[in-house]
Image (spheres, grey):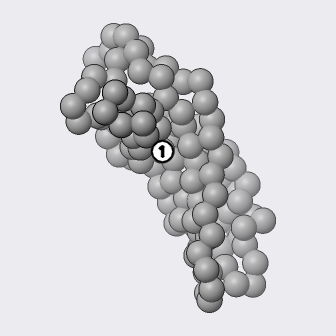
């Protein structure tokens, strides 16, 4: 599956005197009979400064949206923006924003 992604996010508040970098990625998350949670990374980036932390990205998925073992046609899924704040010293922090209500079409090329 190829998706067109329009990603806007302001992650400036994640940067403090102790922030080395922020790893951010967009994942498609869905359920199957075998697994309650499946995650497929669609896009990622490393943000090195507060000045780079206002994201405005129009692109297609960087990584393939495929499922090993089941068909994705008609599948409901969420898009989840994850971020990991990597400090200069101390504990790494992680959080996410879930956008729900997406469904793949029954037929596609």
Outermost residue, top side: 107
Residue 57 visible at all: no
> Seen in the image, is 24 located left or right of residue 30?
right
- Picture layout, residue 72 above or below residue 25: above
> Seen in the image, is 83 located left or right of residue 62?
right
Outermost residue, bottom side: 89
Residue 93, position in %: x, y? 63, 70
- Picture layout, residue 85 above or below residue 1: below
* Image point (32%, 40%), residue name: 64
The quadrant holding residue 79 is top right
Residue in the foreground of this view, choosing between 38 and 6: 38
Screen quadrant of the N terminus: top left
Label 1, on which residue?
27
- Picture layout, residue 37 above or below residue 74: below
* Image point (70%, 84%), residue name: 18
Residue 107, position in %: x, y? 33, 10
Residue in the foreground of this view, choosing between 91 and 16: 91
* Image point (45%, 49%), residue name: 43
**Dot 1 lies on which element?**
strand
* Image point (75%, 64%), residue name: 12
- Picture layout, residue 19 above or below residue 73: below
The quadrant holding residue 10 is bottom right
- The 10 Å Cα crowd at callout 1, few under 14, some 14 to 19, many 20 or more, is many
Screen quadrant of the C terminus: top left
Residue in the foreground of this view, choosing between 2 and 74: 74
Residue 37 visible at all: yes
Residue 11, position in %: x, y? 71, 59
Residue 47, position in %: x, y? 58, 67
> Seen in the image, is 104 located left or right of residue 70?
right
């Amino acid at each position: 599956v190829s998706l067109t992604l329009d990603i806007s996010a302001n992650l400036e508040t994640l940067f403090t005197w102790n922030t080395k970098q922020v790893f951010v990625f967009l994942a498609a998350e869905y359920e199957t009979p075998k697994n309650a949670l499946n995650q497929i990374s669609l896009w990622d980036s490393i943000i090195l400064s507060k000045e780079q932390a206002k994201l405005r990205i129009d692109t297609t998925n960087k990584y393939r949206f495929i499922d090993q073992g089941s068909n994705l046609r008609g599948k409901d899924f969420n898009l989840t923006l994850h971020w990991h704040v990597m400090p200069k010293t101390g504990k790494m922090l992680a959080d996410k924003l879930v956008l729900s209500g997406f469904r793949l079409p029954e037929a596609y090329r």
